[in-house]
Image (cartoon, helix red, strand yellow):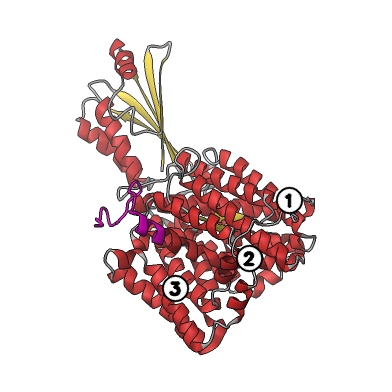
Amino acid sequence: MVREQNGLIYGLDDVPRLIPLAMLGLQHFMLNVPNLAIVVLICRVAGVDAATAESVLSFSLMALGAATLLQCSGRFGSGYFITSCSSGIYLSASLSAAAGGLPLVCGMTLLAGLFQVFFAGLFVRVRRFFPNEIVALAIIIVGIELGAIGLNRLAASGTPGLLAGGTTLLVSVIFGVYGKGGSRLYCALLGMVSGYLLCLFFGLVGPHAANHASSSEHFGLPSVAHLGLEFDIDYLLPFSLAAIGASLKTMGAVITSARINDPAWVRPDMPTVKRGVIADGLSTTLSALLGSVGTNSSTSSVGVSQASGATSRAIGLSVAAWMFLFALSPAFTQVLVSLPDPVVGGALVFAGCLVMANGFQVLGTVQMDMRRAGVVAFPLMLAIACIADAPLFAQLPESLRPLVSSALAVGVLAALVVNAFLSLGSLRRTLIFLDPQRSVGERMSQVRDVLDEWHVAHNVKVRLMLILRELLDERGCNLKLGFDGCTLHVDLTRADTTSDTATLSSGRFFTDRVSDAISYRKDSNGTSLISASFEQ
């Protein structure tokens, strides 16, 4: 008997029964299987034979299974149910390196994974350069890219393919919106099965898939003959940019998962985001060591988990189990990789719509003004132009081509540049004297007016008001405010009394809990200074 809580049937800490757990894991595994086509494509460009490609696929599934377990761990990863997939973010760089052979792809992927781990360590320090509007933009662009890839695959087989792909999408939407219980849980899987049956009816799935599978072993260990690492500094820039894009995509996946599981979500928890990005970088590193390509968090899986109402991290165990099972079953792996394009396309369009919706919801938490609108609008236009293969990018010098290798890279880089430009001179500071002759409410209103003028996020204003309500008393004080668009810095100076030290050391309820950082010190001139900071 399933129960719904906060719109979810299985919440983060719930554990479904065995059969639903296995089916939900299979659904997410099936959703990520089409991404294995990226591995196949890179193997073909690298010139490896079919047997080697099969071993690479098996090791890819092992790496993805381990990556999913790592990401679902609250100690080593984000702690949310986020599966891993072979990532299209690394596709452009990997295809370029594949001309030098598969070991070169693996070596540069290893460096990209290590760079991602290093970049995660800088996340807290560079948080101001990645405000919520840029995170939302990254999520929206990923959704658009998923949808564009899905539409291209959906239209690849003519009218029958459009009907099969449209059926996949329609069935997924119907069960995701109107379904109850089990039908909603398996909405994406039901859509893919419906589309596959139509492909069989139209003859879009030929007998070659079954023949290929029957000629492969049903169970066996993959060969390790292809393992090896090579490096070339010429490919360092594109792989580094891909790693940054993968970090932002993982950041978006963690934030989206947090918002889905917490109805009261207002802002990212950076330590959780950092662990998620580190786990993603370690996963890419492991994949390279196993002779495969770059991995990344699956935003489509996050979208489907919201649509199905099942975000339990226990499902990650089921997904990993399916991945390890099929990694040791080359015959089944070949069948799954041969899913018809219309079915893959319909599933990707469905997931892309959900991911875009999540991006817009994150954007809705931002108090928009002309500066923030510019940070989102222009980069989004450039990203769409990149997806549409606009002639603008073909005119760029060859040395700049890696910067525009994907729509996500284009959009995020443009957003960072626009944000830095529009932030020039935007650092705001003011000093407010809070007159003790006025009531506490009047003094708080005085501060609130300044925060409203600066377009400070609502959650920051509420937290600062809670602290002021505790600290303001009969003494006059000077309140120094500084805001850089991301972090609000507050310094409250007033005449010192012995009660200040005793009170602050024992802790106030809100003062010690709602700020991101707080400190207290007593100056030699007989004044006390309370400093706090608030991240949006």
* Residue type at tag 2: Glu
Q: Quadrant of residue 379?
A: bottom right
* Residue type at tag 3: Met
| Residue corresponding to mark 2 | 217
> Which label sits in the foreground, 1 or 3?
3
The disc, 1 or 3, on the residue closer to the chain's N-terminal end is 1
Whether residue 425 is visible, yes or no, is no
The disc, 2 or 3, on the residue closer to the chain's N-terminal end is 3
| Residue corresponding to mark 1 | 107
The majority secondary structure of the magenta stretch comes to loop
Magenta stretch encompasses residue 423: no
> What crowding class fits label 1: few (fewer than 14 Cα within 10 Å), some (14-19), or many (20 or more)?
many
Q: Secondary structure at mark 1?
A: helix
> Magenta segment, which residues?
1-24
User: Which of these two is toward me, 41 or 48?
Assistant: 48
Q: CA distance from mark 2 to mark 1?
A: 29 Å
User: Which of these two is toward me, 419 or 212?
Assistant: 212
Q: Secondary structure at mark 3?
A: helix
User: Which of these two is toward me, 287 or 332?
Assistant: 332
* Residue type at tag 1: Gly
Q: Residue at x 43, y 70 (%)?
A: 350
| Residue corresponding to mark 3 | 192
Relative to 211, residue 116 above or below: above
